[in-house]
Image: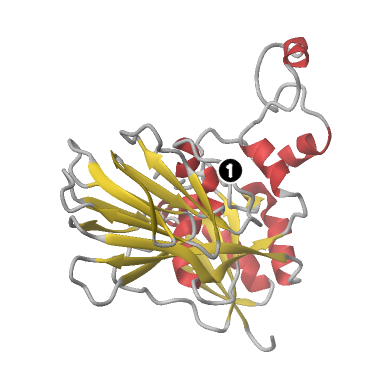
Amino acid sequence: MTGVRHAVVVTHTRLRQSGTVVSDVVGRLHDAGFDVSIIDNLEPPAFDVQPPVVGDDTEIVVVLGGDGTILRAAELVRCTSTPILGVNMGHVGFLAEFESFQMDEAIRRIATRDYSIDERMIAHVDVWLPGASTPIENWALNDITLERADRGKMVELSISVDDVEMSSFGADGVIVSTPTGSTAYAFSAGGPIMWPNVKALQLVPLAAHALFARPLVIGADSTFTITILDDSMSGGWICCDGRRQRALPKGTRVDVRASHGTLRLARLSGAPFTERLVTKFDLPVVGWREQAAHGGAGGANHGQHGVAADFRSTYADHSDYRHDGDGEARR
């Protein structure tokens, strides 16, 4: 890559209004030789509209905010090779690579291209409305939720895998998540955590009225099909990554599979996902006796040693598992 280097800075509107942090980051990028564009107001696009993406000349998208801002920025780089680097300014920061106090190091590593690329699976969504000959297409980095449209009634769903029906039940809805989204809403609903290098999708029922309504995990070559039954008590409401959403009438079919493309996250730390998980969720990595010796029960704050403790200096704690940070948590 030669000539002028271009970076895009994506930030939350409230952060932009504060001025100081954003101006400081833009100034440092300018000093490092970048031409910088700032985006601070990414409104959710209509469900059937594909918003524009960054140009081929964009070297990196730097996100200042929480995980919710990273999900918004993902719309700018879908189907491109441009990576996202998250600097956590929010409450969660599970997807972010750096904390705000490490900005000097982040800019230096960006300037020298001293980062690796973490390829994350994207889910592809086909929505087949009743009588439609072509689907409405969408996608998700985190998750797709199909929930009841009428809050006082259940939505009745049929669940199939690779065109074989597995179950049908009434529920508040279902979540289909990628490995990236498995630590978010799906985790809160009882789904398993999937490591980012796992090539799979999971479906997690929400308050299903059924004896067998457990999370399902399928391989990347398989497809989940969720159908709103014609005699359902409620229509449905679909939402991708907490942003792109629309109502679904009874009889709608939704197919979810792994996309052929991926989303690229810039990684500056070589720490494995397991350490990030221990730190972010404050997992208890010592027995109860050692916890008691350190002053009571607790997670990794109590008696945690070794690499996990070192890792804590890089990644801040949080108490919200949802990847919709910046005051937009849906939990």
Seen in the picture, residue 231 relative to 296 is either above or below; the reply is below
> Which residue is found at the position 72% from the left and 71% from the top?
111
| Mark 1, residue position | 193
Q: Which residue is at the front of the view, 194 or 108?
A: 194
Q: Is residue 85 visible?
A: yes
Q: Which quadrant of the structure image shows residue 199?
A: bottom right
Q: Which quadrant of the structure image shows residue 151?
A: top left
> Which residue is found at the position 45% from the left and 38% from the top?
214
Q: Indicate the position of residue 90 as horizontal and vertical percent values.
A: 51, 45
Give SS at disc 1.
loop
> Which residue is found at the position 50% from the left and 62% from the top?
222
Q: Is residue 147 visible?
A: no
Category of crowding for the residue at label 1, using alpha-carbon neighbours closer than 10 angstroms: few (below 14), some (14–19), many (at least 20):
some
Q: Indicate the position of residue 157 as horizontal and vertical percent values.
A: 28, 48
In the picture, the quarter occupied by the C terminus is top left
Q: Is residue 41 left or right of residue 27?
A: left
Furthest residue toward bottom: 3
